[in-house]
Amino acid sequence: MPDRRPVTLSWSSRPTLASPARRSFDGGVRRYRTECGAGDFFFGDNVAGLDVLREERPESVTLAYMDPPFLTNRVHELVLPDDRSAPKSERAKRTAFDDRWDDRASYLESLAERITRVRDLLAPHGSLVVHVDPKTSHYVKVMCDEIFGDDAFASEIVWRYRRWPSKTPNFQRVHDVLLRYRKDPRHAPRWNTTYEPLAPSTRAVWGDTKQRAVFADNGHRKKSSVTEEKSLGVPMGDVWEIGVLAPMAKERTGYPSQKPLALLDRLVEALSSPGDVVLDPYAGSGTTLVSAAKLGRRFVGLDASTLSLETSMARLAREGFTLSTEETPSPERAPASAPRLTADASSPPRSIRKKRSA
């Protein structure tokens, strides 16, 4: 019989991982919506936004993707385009997010506070994907085992990429870790089988059509036949080779930590269906929101960074989804400083509508 004694992380003054009560905030959140119903963006503390969502629509999310800070202990900034050629000390910058922590325990407490709220938002067939680096992945996995139960762990995806080599005396780090958990193992999770193309060597010999073979009991092939059915490829494995964004890539926004659209497209297509809700509590550059909108899912993004809101709004507007704010919130609900938005190339118009096909 397997040992069912729980394995836990422990540190001084660690809070409980039970479903948290709603917290009150001085800042609150401001909600931005699309008129076409494609999605919402909560600007402000993501814990406050998650609490609003837990009251409004519990167990409504099919896929939650979390790409939290990586415990780098520094402030991440965007260098303004006009100053990229200037000396480092003279470049004009905007803060994207602050990733400084007192210690590892405070980082994990912050993450647990959000993961427990996301768990309450997941539908019974829903999944959470937490995107971390190898430095913290083992801590986060044990913590998620506690929050969801170790039988809810579904898979560990390795995102492998190429990058400029560093001179550190170590093996080059060329991967991130994506931990996937199911909300309730008793329910079949949303799952759409995805495929990767056949290897060129396989296609050179067999082509793109499916082959069938009949084998005798002794293992020898008796006969084979070629069908007219096209091969979809091979089912996707758990090591994904997707390149990071090149410096001059068309989709690059300059936002630190931006992930490639191809990575999010693969997750959204596999773990949700059209019409489902996709949640990103660390919206960042808005890649998850853009992927969900383009693939016919409803998105919910949360972030306290003005730069995140502006970048996400601009990217969504280019796809035909424009966000606009609700009526002015009461002082106790409004964030301390909402961004000033103008209808230029970097910030979309305030009205929201889906563009009609030309």
Image (tube, rainbow, N blue to C red):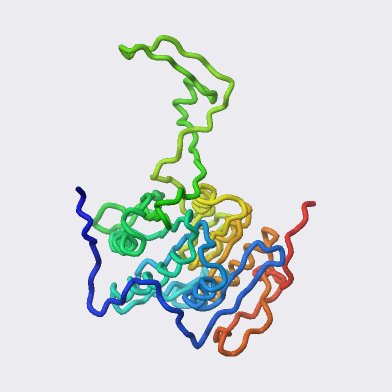
Report whether 112 appears left or right of 307.
Answer: left
Where residue 317 sits: x, y (%)? 67, 64
Q: Give the residue at the far top of this rendering.
A: 222
Where residue 250 sits: x, y (%)? 59, 55
Residue sitting at 55 percent across and 54 percent down?
Answer: 249
Q: Is residue 83 visible?
A: no
Looking at the image, residue 34 lies above or below residue 270: below
Looking at the image, residue 103 lies above or below residue 149: below
Looking at the image, residue 258 lies above or below residue 201: below
Residue sitting at 36 percent across and 54 percent down?
Answer: 152
Where residue 307 sits: x, y (%)? 55, 73
* Displayed quadrant of residue 146: bottom left
Front one among 163 and 314? 314
Report whether 345 appears left or right of 285.
Answer: right
Front one among 153 and 287? 153
Residue sitting at 53 percent across and 16 percent down?
Answer: 226
Report whether 201 appears left or right of 172.
Answer: right
Q: Give the residue at the far bottom of this rendering.
A: 331
Q: Give the residue at the far right of this rendering.
A: 358
Front one among 118 and 30? 118
Residue sitting at 77 percent across and 56 percent down?
Answer: 356
